[in-house]
Amino acid sequence: MLESHAGLPSFSEGLPRPNIAIDEVRRLAAELYGVCGEVRELGSQQDRNFLFTEPASPARPAGRQVLFKVSNRAVRRDEIEAQNEAMRRMHAAGHPSPAPVASLGGLDIETADVDGAPHSIRLLTFVDGTPLIDFEHFSAATIRAMGTLVGQVVQALDGFEHPGLERELQWDLRVGERLVDELIGHVTDPERQALVLAALEATAAALAPLKDELPLQAIHGDLTDDNLVATSGALGRPELSGIIDFGDVGTGWRVAELAVACTAVFHHDPARPLAVLPLIRAFDAVVPLTDAEIDALWPLIVLRGAALVVSGLQQVAIDDGNDYAEAALEREWTIFAVPAALDARVATAAIRRALGREAAAGPSSSAAGGATLLDPDLARRARVITLDHTSTALRDGSWLGEEGADAEAQLLLLAARSGGVAATRFGEARLTRSLGVSRDAPVNVATGVELYSASDLALTAPFGGLVSAAEGHVTISDGARTIVIAGARGLTEARALDGESAAAPTRVESGEPFAEIAGWAQVTLQAGEVSALDAAAAPLPRFVSGEEFPAWLAVLGDPSELIGLAPSSVGGAGADETLRARLDAYAPLQGHYYVHPPQIERGWREMLIDTEGRHYLDMVNNVTALGHGHPVLADTVAQQWRMLNTNSRFNYASVAEFSERLLETLPDSFDTVLLVNSGTEAVDLALRLTKAYTGRDDVACVEESYHGWSYASDAVSTSTSDNPLAAELRAPWVHAFDAPNAYRGTHRGADAGKRYAADAIAEIERLAAAGTPIGTFIAEPRNGNAGAIEVPAGYLAAVYDAVRAGGGAVIADEVQVGYGRQGDVFWGFEQHAGPGGDPIVPDVVTVAKAMGNGHPLGAVITRSEIAQALADQGTFFSSAGGSTLSAKLGVTVLDIMRDDRLQENAHEVGGYLREQLVALAERQPLIGALHGRGLYQGIELVRDRETLEPATSETQALCDRMLALGVIVQPTGDRGNVLKVKPPLCFTKESADRFVATLDEVLTRGL
């Protein structure tokens, strides 16, 4: 408890709301203001608020809405007058707020008897909009807008003076410590009460030297998400449109206005306390914060949370039936618990960094005296084990799940046995402490160095200082810094420290033994002086998030040198710096996902892993069909590199075996394979083959398609998302048919395929009559680039027949959609049948992507007479196409697809995923259509299911939001409104559930 508050008013009695019945409200509203209509009560902590909707009239078709407010009888009249004046100031500053409506007697404030006592009554205009609290997700833009508005409110109230501003108000943070101290008995849960009391003690200590330096002025006092209203703007995101509830207006610390606003963010994103930083930056841009205000801000945020907790519990206790207060209790606990869990020194350092102000420097890690914790010979033999994304010791997903910590311990124990001692790295984002795919970023950055020893280890003092020991902790401090060793025993005068006992601190000199460890210890370097008792009672976290770690460097240092090891060299260039380097040297036209992309450096199965150890669900990698990091493939490639890698003109077995295996997957008419390095090369070569075979230049393709980047493959690529000038730059020998899209195209419905085919055949006949007959028709069996759009039944069969009847040849581009991805068929063309029911058969098939699992490998598969036509014109050779390595890798991919049943998995899991998406679409109107099959699907987002208006901006925003929640998905299609769903073929039902749940969350909570 805090010091006595004798002589000051007590908050313990509380302020029950006025006791007034709804019929009495109707009577008073009619008598005093002439107001009638529908009425419903709005929530309030200590007042009573009633919303009237008056009957519609020609002037007001929707009916006027006004707020009938009965103030708590404890509120003085001059306080209410000050509230009214504050509202007028907001209006003058351009911020919509309630305004007093004069009564029939011409008064802004009326007095009426309520439950036997006089109460002040007002009628206020109603500010239209939705309370910000009803928007579940706050984007960074919304949080910034809050900070700007709060700063503008502070500006508008600066200089406002009124007798009614001087109040004894429980929400005034100047009395917050006393309030919490008096009402702490309402927190009956012992653990929660202890947390509040500990926070109160820390807050009081932090604020004591700052209070006299904090500027005072009139403040609103309650600018939270309850009292900021918004309209739904672009992307459904809130746009702030007004300020309500001026009941807490009074004189207070200026920075308290900001602190109160910050607390509104925590319950929207409890895992990220530093999500408030954009709000603070925006406020500071309007009202620059003083150093004292910056230092006071986080303690005030915690104090506000504590005040909410105790006040809410008190209100529920004294005001039976106050559902508004009851419903807020757990939210208010979150508002307290989230910032209270973050060390205020760390939070303040983060704020200072965000504002560009100088932050506290962490403790010195120098071992200038030459002495170290470890014996120098032992330190030289020590094995430092890497556990982050670069670790080669962690393989094949061994770091995941509960087994991750075991794998970590096994590596370190094995290393300790070989070297005597093993150590981890400070500041390392450990894979072994990551969460796998999760909506929240992992808490996995090490705040210290762990030591594993094969036998007992004596530790020597790296500098002179005071040693203390208690409860398995030993500390040594020189006053400016402290080494804390968890898992150690003290020596010399501290020798008897075990159990609950503790001895007085003992002075040791540099180089003297002072502690020992047996098996394991964690060493942290902390700023200031820390006793062993304090370290044991309130240990710093062993791991923190990557977002918070830079701020922790105001409190922590790297103890490696003091241990006797080299400084930890972790982190390196951040994702933003890496992106800048990429853009400087790597042509920007080779685009990248996201404006601020994570730095992806590792993968496993259907997961991608960034440099902070965060795992993302990979929904876009149709290139890596087997999944990332497949051990069999990796071992095969490594072995082949050791044996031989050369070009295909040499005689070796793997190229023959691979070609035979490819032909086994196709109809018997295919007998020839040509190997290249990519899908682009495959399409380019296929076009050369058919031109040589038919002797014709003209090529037909379909709109909204992509086939590659070479001159020829780009010429037949019609997608405006890849080339906005595709139509303008189209070569005269290229003829684009209407995209056969039965969902939003020219023809729709069950017979769309026949009608699209009729249009295409008419164009084929017209071109032939004009002397430019089609020599080649190229199309995907499913329009992948457009979003896995189904090519309607009957279309390809009819067009194939028409092209061939005119002397042309047809190419099935299977680069994206083939190779088992669709589940029930290996090749996309197999799902299309001719009039007799037999599958259609193209003349040439192109394939790449999946066949190399990310290695540059492509193929053109055709008949020998077509290949011979090109051979008659000259030879074909690709230096790396069909190389020893590529061919061996290609065979291995086919083996793994067979052995791991990946095509079957695509069918089973793809079907399961579709079922979940169908159910999701029934409750999420933004989903207009579901395309595709197997593990090649598309989710088309529309603003209106009737007009099919593309939800282009929403789709991009959704992808950005999904990234923040651990899912990588991207838009595709010419309208940019289709989510491409093409994960690795090892995709599991559990991953499908996570994807659908995350998509549901984003569509429900907002973008």
Image (tube, rainbow, N blue to C red):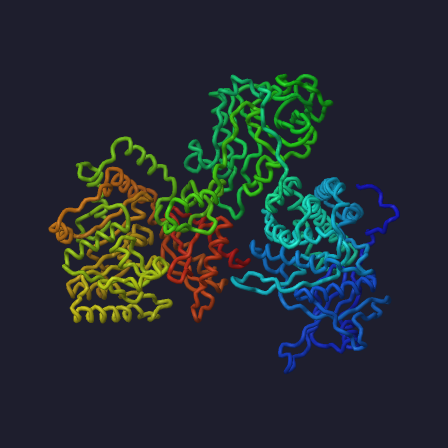
Q: State the image coordinates of residue 942 (x, y, percent, origin top left).
A: 45, 65
Asked if residue 854 can be seen in this view, the reply is: yes
| Viewer-side residue, 770 vs 158 | 158
Asked if residue 190 can be seen in this view, the reply is: no
Q: Quadrant of residue 773?
A: bottom left
In the rendered image, the residue lying farthest to the bottom is 58
In the rendered image, the residue lying farthest to the right is 7
| Viewer-side residue, 45 vs 253 | 253
Would residue 600 be found to the left or right of residue 124 on screen? left
Q: How many marks?
A: 0
Q: State the image coordinates of residue 568 (x, y, percent, origin top left).
A: 52, 30
Q: Residue at x 83, y 70 (%)?
A: 111
Q: Quadrant of residue 164?
A: bottom right
Q: State the image coordinates of residue 194 (x, y, percent, origin top left).
A: 72, 41
| Viewer-side residue, 332 vs 426 | 426
Q: Is residue 91 above or below residue 482?
A: below
Quadrant occupied by the N terminus:
top right
Q: State the image coordinates of residue 947 (x, y, percent, origin top left).
A: 43, 71
Q: Is residue 175 above or below residue 93?
A: above
Q: Is residue 421 above or below residue 309?
A: above
Q: Residue at x 19, y 54 (%)?
A: 688
Would residue 710 be found to the left or right of residue 908 on screen? left
Q: Is residue 388 above or below residue 153?
A: above
Would residue 885 be found to the left or right of residue 487 on screen? left
| Viewer-side residue, 277 vs 201 | 277
